[in-house]
Structure formats: structure tokens, C-alpha cells
Image (cartoon, rainbow, N blue to C red):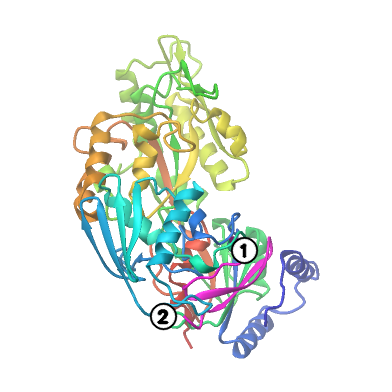
């Protein structure tokens, strides 16, 4: 398979030809053909992924933040235990607001030019100027002290700045042009060969790579829908395919199912304040029903998370209690062991909610316990979760009207109605983004206008800590400190529902290594360790 184009249209036509013909080729023959092809192409790999980066492969605008940047290297990285280790850096020191990073002196970009401190400075300054999802506002200045030493001076101490060094791939100052996103040059394990937008991406091993040489010399990424990805696996056209839980019970000869644990969570964010205010754009803020903590806590207590995992996710997932379950900064005291409808009813009764007119919906001071729950209409899992939660709350006397829509539609309602959203990151700073009062009403951050002075103080302490280890105590307290916090025991600003396992069909003899807990997004997070993948025989 030498750089041939397998675009979506051609592959889909091929797949449906097979299906319509009644699969004239037997399953065993398909498996044999696939095995024979692998004998011929031991150093090539074909993967079916769902999406390509809309803005291309430029780390200064966000590429690589949810998986390996492939073409670029980062100063630091996380290992299989999510511990931070060196990559381009040989070490770093923190002295208050000043971070000093020492670089390897043997790194070259794929075009043969050396990587120096000037490239690091250029990368971070460019990212700061681009005003994209790469948030580097905390940087005051970045300077090259010598050829292989970089000094970052922050506006204030911030322990989570280390994640910017983990997530930001370094670009070459000498080769950064207007079309860099489509023609990236970097020092990562692979280099771009061909990108057919909407169809496929072909990469080859970077001969200049300074670390362990990748086993695979060429990898082709096919951008397919979930249905087409599964069909491609059935047809023996791919070595690995991402699939939804709905296909998890269907066996494909010659392939195994890999279920990867994630913090790719789904939950309901509640408007925290009462209605009455509007945004600068005139959008309504607040909801009088969900502003009552009893309503938010009752939903958290009554929702059967395991039933959602078993029913909606076919068992491939875990109940979610926070946005950071299982990560080093997660507070396990946030767990709600079992759904408890009786306890939820008692909580509501004590708060003054009762069904006064016998219509099955609770009331308080003339206000019905009823609201709309918005979800992304194109996402089948979000739709199913929204409907299931609404059904679960009906016996409790809370009426939830589910409303599907585009992000444009949701954006008109997300400050005044609950929304089913998804997050998930290896950066604890995301908690501050979601819950910090400073972020209220900023894009999709803190859409509920949540505010708790104690929680904000914990965030400030976590960010001002000398390092990640010291900060963990404060991240945990922000979730629940025994008296207050963002989790269900406290303010219940969200009802977190599930963490979705990422499912992949993988050729029996393809070793994809130890997959770390995946972050938000199905596909690219699997590539975090792609340089280590190999055939097992």
C-alpha cells in the first residue's frame, strides 16, 4: 500500500459493494487475505479514525493537545503513569514566576535543521499571538538564555503551566509559513507525506527523530464515520478502527476489541444562579429551578449511573462523579455509591418541593420542577443519555424536556438551561476553567455561572503551588473538603454521568502498547504512544 489514495468515497463504495453482494468472500478468506497483505507490508499501518483537525497540524493553534502531535515534539511529556518526564527538555527548574528549561543539543527537524532555544521562543510567542485555544496568557515573556536554554517568566506563579510545556509542540522558526498547518515540519517521530482533506492522512517515519525509531515506516489515517469505520474493519481494509459501543458485540475475524479507560466524560451542567440577568449579547442567564441546590443534589443522587453505562454504553464505560475521575488530582470522596431515589425524595421534600396538584411534577412557591435539557443532536450517545436521565427523573417529580440542537442553537440557551456536555483532559487546569467564577459565561466554560468563594480560593492555592504534587491537595479540596465543593456532596454544579470507554477493533497481532487514560475525543488520544506500536509476531 504505497501512498495510494483510499479516500472515503472509494473505500465506502468498496465496502458497500461487498455488503450488497452478500459478502461473497468468506470470513476466513478475508482473514487470510489480510494476513497475506501484512506479510507484504510489515512496516505499514492503516487506521480508521473519525475526524481530522479542522485547523490543520499547527501546535500554536491547538494541534496535538488531545494526542500525539506526530510531527512535532514537546518540551515535556507524560509517561504511562501520567508522570511528567523529559522529551526535548533535559530538565527544568522553577523559581517563583521563572521557569528555566534546558534542551537537548542533538535534535533536528525533519528537514535536517537543528532545533534550538530560538525555535522554542518562536513557538510560544506565535501561540500567544494567535489567540487560539492555546491559553498562554500567564506568560509575561519567553527568552533564549543561550542556544539550548529557555526562560519563561510568568505574570504570576502557576503550577499548571507545566502542562503548557507538555502540550505545545515546537515548530521551526526558519520554516514556519502561512501554510504551515497544512505542511508541518517538526522534530517528532513522523513527517507528513500526503493529506487529502476529508479523506486520509499519510505519514512516514522521520529519519531525523532523536528518540526510539518508530516500528512503522508509514501510517495511513482514514477519516471515516463510525459505520464506515466498522465496515472497513469487516472488509479487512484497516489494521485498527474506532467504533461506537453499539458495534461492540459484533465479532470481526482476525481482530480484537480494545476498550480503553478514559476521562472522556459526559455530564449535565446546571445554571447555578436564578434568572433575571443577561449576557453582553443579550442571552438570558440563570434558571430558577436548577438554582435550587436541592434539585441539583436530588438529580445527582437519583440518577443511576451504572444503568447508563450498561444501557447506553453497552457496559463500556464507568460511572462519572467529577470531570477528573481516576486522575492523580481526583478526590475519591466524591463517589456516590448507588442511586437512591428515596433519599432524593426526602431531600426535595425537606426543601419544600411537593406535588400540590397531582400532575406528577413537584412545585415550590408556584414554580414547577421542570426545565429543558439541551444536547448535541448529531451525537447519538448524548441523545440517549439525555433521554435516559429524563426518564429516571420522572418518578422523582422532576420533568426534563430534552431538546436536541446544533452548537449554535445550544449556545443561545446554555446560560439559562442545563446542557449535556463533555470534557476530559490530563490538565487539572480544566477544573478551574469549568468551575472558576472568573470563567463564568466565557464560551463553553462555566456556562452555569457557578461561584463559590471557598472553591475559588482552593483554585488560587492550586495554581500558586510550587508544583503539581503540592497543588493536588487543593484540587481535591475544591471537589469536596468535607463541607463544601463543586461535587454532588456540595454545590452539585454538575451531574456527571459517565466516562466513555474508547473502543477500537485492532488486528490480533498489532500491539498498541499500554494505553494511558484517554482524554476527550475518540481517535487521536490513542496515538499518544504511537511510536511504540508494533506487530507482535
Q: Which residues are magenta?
A: 181-208
Query: Can residue 99 be seen?
Result: yes
Judging from the image, what secondary structure is the residue with disc 2 in? loop
Query: Can residue 261 be seen?
Result: no
**Is residue 168 placed above or below 359 in the rendered structure?**
below
**Is residue 357 placed above or below 248 in the rendered structure?**
above
Can residue 162 be found in the magenta stretch? no
- Which mark sits nearer the N-terminus, 1 or 2? 1
Q: Residue 481 vs residue 411: left or right? A: left
Q: Quadrant of residue 45?
A: bottom right
Q: Front-most of 433 and 129?
A: 129
User: Which quarter of the rendered picture does the N terminus lie within?
Assistant: bottom right
Q: Which residue is mark 2?
A: 210
Q: Horizontal and vertical percent for residue 40?
A: 63, 90
Residue ranking furthest to the front? 146
Judging from the image, what secondary structure is the residue with disc 1 in? helix
Could you classify mark 2 by the number of other residues whose Cα lies within 10 Å: few (under 14), some (14-19), or many (20 or more)? some
Can residue 188 be found in the magenta stretch? yes
Amino acid at each position: 500500500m504505497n501512498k495510494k489514495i483510499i479516500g472515503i468515497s472509494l473505500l465506502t463504495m468498496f465496502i458497500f459493494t461487498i455488503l450488497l453482494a452478500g459478502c461473497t468472500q468468506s470470513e476466513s478468506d478475508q482473514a487470510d487475505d489480510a494476513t497475506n497483505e501484512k506479510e507484504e507490508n510489515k512496516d505499514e499501518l492503516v487506521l480508521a479514525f473519525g475526524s481530522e483537525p479542522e485547523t490543520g497540524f499547527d501546535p500554536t493553534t491547538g494541534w496535538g493537545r488531545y494526542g500525539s502531535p506526530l510531527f512535532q515534539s514537546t518540551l515535556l511529556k507524560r509517561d504511562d503513569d501520567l508522570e511528567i518526564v523529559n522529551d526535548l527538555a533535559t530538565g527544568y527548574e522553577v523559581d517563583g514566576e521563572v521557569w528555566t528549561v534546558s534542551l537537548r543539543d542533538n535534535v533536528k527537524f525533519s528537514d535536517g535543521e537543528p532545533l534550538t532555544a530560538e525555535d522554542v521562543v518562536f513557538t510560544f510567542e506565535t501561540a500567544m499571538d494567535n489567540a487560539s485555544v492555546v491559553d498562554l496568557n500567564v506568560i509575561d515573556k519567553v527568552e533564549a538564555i543561550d542556544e539550548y536554554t529557555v526562560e519563561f517568566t510568568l505574570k504570576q506563579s502557576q503550577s499548571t503551566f507545566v502542562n503548557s510545556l507538555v502540550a505545545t509542540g515546537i515548530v521551526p522558526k526558519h520554516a514556519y509559513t502561512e501554510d504551515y498547518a497544512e505542511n508541518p515540519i517538526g522534530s517528532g517521530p513522523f513527517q507528513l507525506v500526503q493529506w487529502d482533506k476529508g479523506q486520509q492522512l499519510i505519514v512516514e517515519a522521520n529519519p531525523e527523530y532523536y528518540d526510539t525509531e518508530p516500528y512503522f515506516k508509514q501510517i495511513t489515517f482514514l477519516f471515516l464515520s463510525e459505520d464506515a469505520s466498522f465496515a472497513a474493519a469487516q472488509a479487512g481494509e484497516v489494521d485498527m478502527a474506532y467504533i461506537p459501543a453499539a458495534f461492540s458485540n459484533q465479532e470481526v475475524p482476525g481482530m480484537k476489541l480494545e476498550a480503553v479507560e478514559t476521562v472522556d466524560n459526559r455530564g449535565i451542567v446546571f445554571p447555578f444562579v436564578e434568572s433575571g440577568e443577561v449576557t453582553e449579547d443579550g442571552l438570558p442567564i440563570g434558571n430558577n429551578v436548577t438554582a435550587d441546590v436541592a434539585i441539583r443534589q436530588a438529580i445527582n443522587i437519583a440518577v443511576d449511573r451504572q444503568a447508563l453505562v450498561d444501557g447506553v454504553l453497552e457496559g463500556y464505560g464507568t460511572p462519572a462523579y467529577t470531570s477528573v475521575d481516576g486522575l492523580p488530582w481526583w478526590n475519591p470522596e466524591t463517589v456516590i455509591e448507588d442511586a437512591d431515589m428515596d433519599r432524593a425524595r426526602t431531600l426535595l421534600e425537606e426543601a419544600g418541593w411537593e406535588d400540590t396538584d397531582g400532575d406528577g411534577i413537584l412545585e415550590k412557591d408556584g414554580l414547577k420542577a421542570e426545565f429543558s435539557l439541551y444536547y448535541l443532536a448529531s451525537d447519538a450517545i448524548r441523545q440517549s443519555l439525555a433521554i435516559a436521565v429524563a426518564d429516571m427523573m420522572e418518578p422523582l417529580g422532576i420533568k426534563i424536556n430534552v431538546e436536541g440542537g446544533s452548537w449554535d442553537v445550544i449556545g443561545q440557551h446554555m446560560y439559562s438551561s442545563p446542557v449535556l456536555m463533555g470534557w476530559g483532559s490530563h490538565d487539572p487546569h480544566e477544573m478551574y476553567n469549568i468551575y472558576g467564577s472568573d470563567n463564568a459565561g466565557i464560551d463553553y466554560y462555566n456556562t452555569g455561572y457557578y461561584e463559590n468563594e471557598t472553591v475559588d480560593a482552593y483554585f488560587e492555592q492550586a495554581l500558586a503551588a510550587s508544583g503539581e504534587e503540592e497543588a493536588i491537595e487543593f484540587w481535591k479540596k475544591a471537589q469536596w473538603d468535607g463541607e463544601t465543593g463543586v461535587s454532588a456532596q456540595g454545590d452539585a454544579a454538575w451531574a456527571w454521568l459517565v466516562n466513555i470507554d474508547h473502543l477500537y477493533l485492532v488486528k490480533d497481532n498489532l500491539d498498541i502498547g499500554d494505553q494511558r487514560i484517554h482524554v476527550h475525543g475518540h481517535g487521536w488520544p490513542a496515538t499518544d504512544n504511537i511510536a511504540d506500536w508494533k506487530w507482535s509476531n
